[in-house]
Amino acid sequence: MTQTARPTPDTLRRTDFPAGFTFGVATSSYQIEGAANEDGRGPSIWDTFCAQPGRIADGSDGSVACDHYHRWEADLDLIASLGVDAYRFSVAWPRVQPSGSGPMNAAGLDFYERLTDGLLARNVQPHVTLYHWDLPQPLQDAGGWANRDTAYLFAEYGAAVAARLGDRVRSYATLNEPWCSSILSYEIGHHAPGLRDRRLALAAAHGLLLGHALALPEVRRHAPGAQAGIVLNLGPQVSASDRPEDVAAARLADGRLNRWFLDPLLRGEYPRDVWEACGPDVPDVREGDLDLIAAPLDFLGVNYYSRGVVGASGGGVPAGAPVTDMGWEIYPLGLTDLLTRLRADYPKLPPVVITENGAAFADERSGGQVHDPQRVAYLQTHLMALLDALDAGVDVRGYFAWSLMDNFEWAFGYGKRFGLVYVDYPTQERTLKDSARWYRQFLR
Ligand code: IFM
């Protein structure tokens, strides 16, 4: 057997990955679309949240964002020019069904159909996420994801989208990062709707998983040729020391972030240790819920950015470790560790797609150029880490860089730039950063 030489970050090429491996870029609706009040779109929880003083670091909102709703054709040309196989975007529920229940908005569905067909015309596979956090406000007024009715309404909305776009879409993810749309949003209060109530957060997390479970068969019914799955934000939670109290804290952090979502989906049960730690706040899990939630997936989407180093007295980044502009440790080995752990711990793990990976840095444009060597290195080292996981036998089918372009980074506003493409917000001019040029070269 011939041994192929291991690539270095500089020699890394798409041909180092298996044939048929999908490379793409990703975005989400509220972060790029703008046009918040156009063509019948209804208000979302993020419109409401942004309007509350003090919620968003720079006081901004997504009402204009990257103006993608109007610039979509040029943006699709930009995507195609990178040479990617696929583009992952999300559908805004309030654009398609303004009240979250009742009539669909034809203009909203038309927009996503144009996007889908525009991608196919450019030979780029559309990968759709049905929910990336922009819940119609009327549903929040009725309790949001903590109200079980939302899960059933989500399935109806998902059915309408899949019925319209069908198999033209290669892959449907029901949810993006349900930890964020439950714990970060209902318990930590950092995201819309900005609540601080652990009981509601756990009810919302269960409601989201139920919504996923109810939407999945609808997607399969209307798009039988597409892949259907869910996207989780995952990361190793390692102990700050060997002290038993630190080890226990890291185990619980892992349970809250990772196992609370992985175990119901891939084992049909909530992790017992976390359940017990939640005491009276545990969700109302009804007969049959977990069987539905554990239905087989075509893929598990994994969003990986960093790891957590956890101790009994809190977490933090190890002294001297490199960090991104978000303050997140740059730790590529965590991606290999995470993927090999998923394979070891979950016999029912479906094929994995890295649906997001990337980094924010304080980029500046000068002379029409944006030099972002840290992002180039981030992408290279994480792709190398992914190769290590593939070598270890983990079945990974794709990789999407977050993000196509700079966009609205939620509670951080426009101050954090994750894009491969720089956006000058006053003019909406797009400029390829060096990282976009590197990715294009890597894919060529
Ligand atoms: O911008 C977000 C995205 O919406 C979800 N995953 C993490 C990204 C960076 O914070």
Image (tube, rainbow, N blue to C red):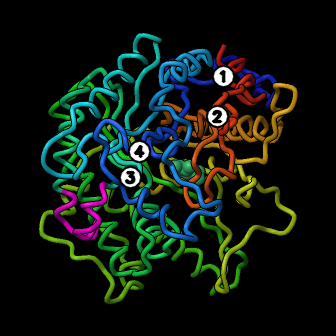
User: What residue sits 44% from the left and 41% below the top?
Assistant: 29
| Ligand 1 lies under 8 Å from the Cβ of mark 2 | no
**Horizontal and vertical percent position of residue 7:** 77, 26
How much space separates mark 3 and mark 1, taking CA atoms?
37 Å
How much space separates mark 2 and mark 1, taking CA atoms?
8 Å
Q: Identity of the amino acid at label 2? A: Leu
**Horizontal and vertical percent position of residue 62:** 50, 49
State whether residue 130 is above or below residue 163.
below
Compare marks 3 and 2 and give the one earlier in the sequence: 3
Q: Identity of the amino acid at label 4? A: Ala
How much space separates mark 4 and mark 1, taking CA atoms?
42 Å
Q: Which secondary structure, mark 2?
A: helix
Instruction: Say which mark, if any, is on residue 36.
Output: 4
Q: Is residue 171 left or right of residue 216?
A: right
Q: Which secondary structure, mark 4?
A: loop
Q: Point out the stretch of residues depicted in magenta.
A: 136-151
Label 3–label 2 contact, CB within 8 A? no
Say which of 258 and 127 sits in front: 127
Label 2–label 1 contact, CB within 8 A? yes
How much space separates mark 2 and mark 4, taking CA atoms?
40 Å
Q: Which residue is mark 3?
A: 134
